[in-house]
Image: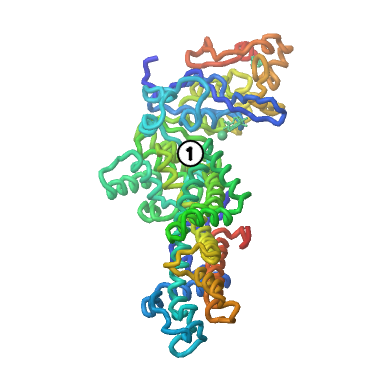
Amino acid sequence: MSKKLALSIEDLHVTYQLNGASGKNKVARAVDGVDLQVAVGETLALVGESGSGKTSMANAIMRLIDPSAGKIVIDGVDVVPLQGKGLRSMRRNFQMIFQDPFESLDPRQRVIEAVMEPLEIHGIGGSESERREMALAALAQAGLRPAAEIGERFTHQLSGGQRQRVAIASAIILKPALIIADEPVSMLDVSLRAGILRVMADLRDQLGVSYLFITHDLSLAWMFADRIAVIYLGRIVEEASAVDLIANPMHPYTKALVSVIPVPEVTALEDRIILTGEIPSPASIPSGCRFHPRCPLFRELGEPEQCLTQDPVLQIQSNAESHHVACFFSEHNKGNQ
Amino acid sequence: MMKRDRTSANHGFWYFMGKLWADRMGRWGLIALAITTFIAVICPIFFPFDPSKVGADAASILTGPSKTHLLGSDELGRDVLRQFFTGARISLFVGIMATVISTIVGSGLGIFAGYYMGRLDGILMRITDFFLVVPALPLMIALGAIFGQNITVIIMVIGFLSWPRTARIVRSQTLSLRQRQFVPRAKSLGSSNLRIIRTHIVPHVMPLIVANTILVVAGCILSEATLSFIGLGDPDRISWGTMLHFSFVSGAIGRGAWWYFLPPGFGILFIVLGFTLVGHSFEKITNPRLGGSE
Ligand SMILES: Nc1ncnc2c1ncn2[C@@H]1O[C@H](COP(=O)(O)OP(=O)(O)O)[C@@H](O)[C@H]1O
Ligand code: SF4
Ligand SMILES: [Mg+2]
């Protein structure tokens, strides 16, 4: 792998200690051994249903929670062992756009203050007026115009879409190598989503930032990302280029997700696969392949022993170098179509 | 999706004055405070009290209101009205200084305990639990008696024994604030904890601290009056409480010298009421869901 990497995650684990009423302390393995790479300038979408561990992963990468194991290499530096001042000064390299813009901005700050804050923290810009200029430029870049006028408002006076633009402006102002966007449009009105995504795409083209784009919506990932990684119960089950993954899904879970994308050219290929049951709790991950209780292929194949006892690892598929799947029978699955 | 109310965000001094004035409770409180402040700050300038200016003979002792002494004289023949003006000043001064100590200690500990949680929080909660069980007044009396009748001692004793309530409520608001998403966001920007406290916690806790401070002043003035009344006041700095003390020990109450004990008594009542009304009104303004009671 010769590409320069903005982000490289190795065997990342995030666990939560649960203080159950049952008396016995249980552990939830929300992220359970994830490897991921994002090349410089690339957008990788992390797709999974609610509870699959996406936010836990984002928070761990952002060092907002401590991973229980693993490496997180950002721009060549493993940030996991960093603490205190060293960590704080590294933070300008990786920024996050939070899911809920109604919560992530301080309602007592003016917009301009929120965008100038990262500059003040890192001592960027020689003077107050220089920082103000930079903040206004970032606001305009995020599509908030007239920036000078909007900058004077308090963040709580803005709409959700405007707030998310403020969050974007304050993330890009540090010129980070990596931006993690945790479902950046899921809390917004459908009518506003395209505008926010366009701004994010423009920034990618202008600044060459790399995105880890988190979403539960596979069609959104397909639209926005170069590559897609599908996460299920804390584990990546399939990873491929966006085009390849949608056109040729190999993991039974991905197949099910793809089959319900509301786009005719995709769904016309076959009938929709409706998954039964709920995603299990990360405190009680099923044995063997963690997807087996919900896996249509597992039932179709007559419940093979292997799925119950062995944990499939993410492996390169023979047909495509960059297509990885974690399923013992994915080839069989493909032939079955 | 629009969740919390943010009515009290981002307003200045005059906004709150206007709001207080618009509230009936707040308006009466403001009037009371304006009157007492005038008495305490302005009146002693024009009518200074000289404790050494005692009466010439026995006939000038505990005389009722007259042209020379509008509010009569005390047991040493000194002018009660002038004493009343100065007493207001001392009562207010001690109350405010003690409150400053109490607020700084209480808010500081409350914010740090709530933000960092952990061990500091455990210790702090133990201490406040202790003070919630052991009433502060007997402790104040004991400490006041040990350290002597001195205005600085009184301020310190009252100040350092009045902060637990403040610490408790500031802590609980800080605890809920640190759950808000703008805290991890600030952290992800590279903010240090101290900076987060300064820019994102303190501004949110401030209205609560102010409302509480106003109520604490009332409590501290009352504590001072109590300590002084039982004889622990500074004899060189006569407060309303001290006046009550001397009117009691000199037998003025027994002799029906109402001009000597009624003014400081009503003064204390008036000023405490003023602060309490304004404090509760402010609480209501900054937290509409409170509805005026806790
Ligand atoms: N602080 C926490 N304590 C315990 N469990 C948690 C905590 N945060 C998340 N979880 C659990 O971890 C799992 C993954 O959650 P999350 O990372 O938020 O997933 P996603 O963002 O994909 O919805 C969920 O089962 C959730 O209940
Ligand atoms: S390994 Fe077995 S259970 Fe798991 S996805 Fe493949 S077929 Fe389904
Ligand atoms: Mg999430």
- Quarter of the picture holding the N terminus of chain A: top left
Q: Quadrant of residue A52?
A: top right
Q: Residues within 10 Å of mark 1 (few under 14, many from 20)?
A: many
Classify mark 1: helix, strand or loop: helix
Measured along the vertical axis of the image, is residue B228 above or below residue A94?
below
Q: Determine whether the beta carbon of the residue marked 1 sits less than 8 angstroms from the nearest atom of ligand 1.
A: no
Left or right: where does residue A126 sit relative to residue A15? left
Left or right: where does residue A130 sit relative to residue B171? left
Front residue of B238 and B180: B238
Q: Quadrant of ligand 1?
A: top right
Front residue of A237 and A60: A60
Measured along the vertical axis of the image, is residue B187 above or below residue A28?
below
Q: Position of residue A120 (x, y in %)?
A: 34, 43
Measured along the vertical axis of the image, is residue B7 above or below residue A322?
below
The residue drawn where x is 41% and y is 84% is B56
Q: Position of residue A14 (x, y in %)?
A: 55, 25
Measured along the vertical axis of the image, is residue A325 above or below residue B229?
above
Q: Position of residue A105 (x, y in %)?
A: 47, 46
Residue behind mark 1: B184
Left or right: where does residue B93 sit relative to residue A246? left
The residue drawn where x is 70% and y is 20% is A293
The residue sitting at the left extreme is A126
- Three-letter code, disc 1: Pro
Front residue of A220 and A283: A283
The residue drawn where x is 63% and y is 20% is A252
Left or right: where does residue B49 sit relative to residue B263? left
Q: Which of the chains bears the disc numbered 1? A: B
Front residue of B68 and A47: B68
